[in-house]
Image (cartoon, helix red, strand yellow):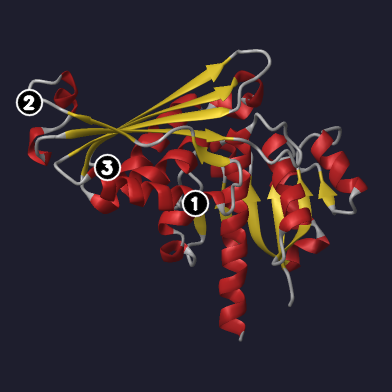
């Protein structure tokens, strides 16, 4: 089998972890180039030691590399603003883009929910770490009953939030909330991120609350458990912290004020508590927020490659 050659833009934590995941785990992909703007960055230096072609001249440098002709997929692990420029520069060259920033130029993709329908898209967006962790379970609830309102809180270790994450807080909340609606199926949604300064650092925790109509709680729980298993197939540290919680709502419960009357009256509050431990390929195990992004992106890249092989055969 011929492996699909990929490039990784961004030699920071996310880009470097993704590069190592491709090198260690992927049967379909090969790292054809590592791209950065700081020649002294650990990511570029590590790539060079591993025999990966590198450039410190950004996307323009990538386009000028002789290896660029063989690269089919480009992962962008920079920032939302940088991705706008990177996408513009790469557009004439017809490369497939997998965007790990909150730029959201292309369609949102969460592998367990909607990957198949977007495998041919030229630029897919991986939403955010909070989105990758919580959208699957919101979609699972929505598979059993309409989700009238969803609210998620992503709590990550402050040490795992680099300059890109900190610069994109607004984009994080806006992009995650929108994707909870577009991909997760919630009628209305809200996203919150918490940077936890605890030392030693705590691993990623995600809290999901959904307001739903009348339904058999067992049906909802079965959907959620199946979805958690599906995500854990490519993010082994993804798990429930406790059983799915259900609270019956009274008509005058304050929670009902969060729901637009046009959507109906909520009868239950479903609460799901998740934990995401990183695989520690490059990043510390507490950085599950970064690990779930690179793991999801790897799944997308491998699926694009597999689709390419299917067309050839």
Alpha-carbon neighbours of circle 3 within 10 Å: few (<14), some, or many (≥20)?
many
Residue 186 image label = 3
Q: Quadrant of residue 13?
A: top right
Q: Quadrant of residue 161?
A: top right
Say whether marks 3 and 2 touch (CB < 8 Å).
no
- Please indicate whether residue 75 sits to the left or right of residue 137 in the image: right
Q: Secondary structure at mark 3?
A: loop
**Do we see residue 100 in this rendering?**
yes
Q: Earlier in the sequence, mark 1 or mark 2?
A: 1
Separation of residues labelled 3 and 2 (CA atoms): 21 Å
Please give the label number shown on residue 251. Answer: 2
**In this view, the mark in front (3 or 1):** 1
In the rendered view, does 51 fall on the left or right side of 202? right
The local crowd at label 1, few if under 14, some if 14 to 19, many if 20 or more residues have their Cα within 10 Å, is some
Viewer-side residue, 308 vs 57: 308
x, y percent for residue 74: 65, 55
Residue 218, given in percent of the width and then of the height, sits at 27, 47
306, above or below 106, in the image? below
Of marks 3 and 1, which one's residue comes earlier in the chain? Answer: 3
Residue position for label 1? 229
Quadrant where the N terminus sits is bottom right
Give how far across and how far down residue 215 sits, in percent.
17, 45
The x and y percentages for residue 118 are: 44, 62
Q: CA distance from mark 3 to mark 1?
A: 21 Å
């Amino acid at each position: 089998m011929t492996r699909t050659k990929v490039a990784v833009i961004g030699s920071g934590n996310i880009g470097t972890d993704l590069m190592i995941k491709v090198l260690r785990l992927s049967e379909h992909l090969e790292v054809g180039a590592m791209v950065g703007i700081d020649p002294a960055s650990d990511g570029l230096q590590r790539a060079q030691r591993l025999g990966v072609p590198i450039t410190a001249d950004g996307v323009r440098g990538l386009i000028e590399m002789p290896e660029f002709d063989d690269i089919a997929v480009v992962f962008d692990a920079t920032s939302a603003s940088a991705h706008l420029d990177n996408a513009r520069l790469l557009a004439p060259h017809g490369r497939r883009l997998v965007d790990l920033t909150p730029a959201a130029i292309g369609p949102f993709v969460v592998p367990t929910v909607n990957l198949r329908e977007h495998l041919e898209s030229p630029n897919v967006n991986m939403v955010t770490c909070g989105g990758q962790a919580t959208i699957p379970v919101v979609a699972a609830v929505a598979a059993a009953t309409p989700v009238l309102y969803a609210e998620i809180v992503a709590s990550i270790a402050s040490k795992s939030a680099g300059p890109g994450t900190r610069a994109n807080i607004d984009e994080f909340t806006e992009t995650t909330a929108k994707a909870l609606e577009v991909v997760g199926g919630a009628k209305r949604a809200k996203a919150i991120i918490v940077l936890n300064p605890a030392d030693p650092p705590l691993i990623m925790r995600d809290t999901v609350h959904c307001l739903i109509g009348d339904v058999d709680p067992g049906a909802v729980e079965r959907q959620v458990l199946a979805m958690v298993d599906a995500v854990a197939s490519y993010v082994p540290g993804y798990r429930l912290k406790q059983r799915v919680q259900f609270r019956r709502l009274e008509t005058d419960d304050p929670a009902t004020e969060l729901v637009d009357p046009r959507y109906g009256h909520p009868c239950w509050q479903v609460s799901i508590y998740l934990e995401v431990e990183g695989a520690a390929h490059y990043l510390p195990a507490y950085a599950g927020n970064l690990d779930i992004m690179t793991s999801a992106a790897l799944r997308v890249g491998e699926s694009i490659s597999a689709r390419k092989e299917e067309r050839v055969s």
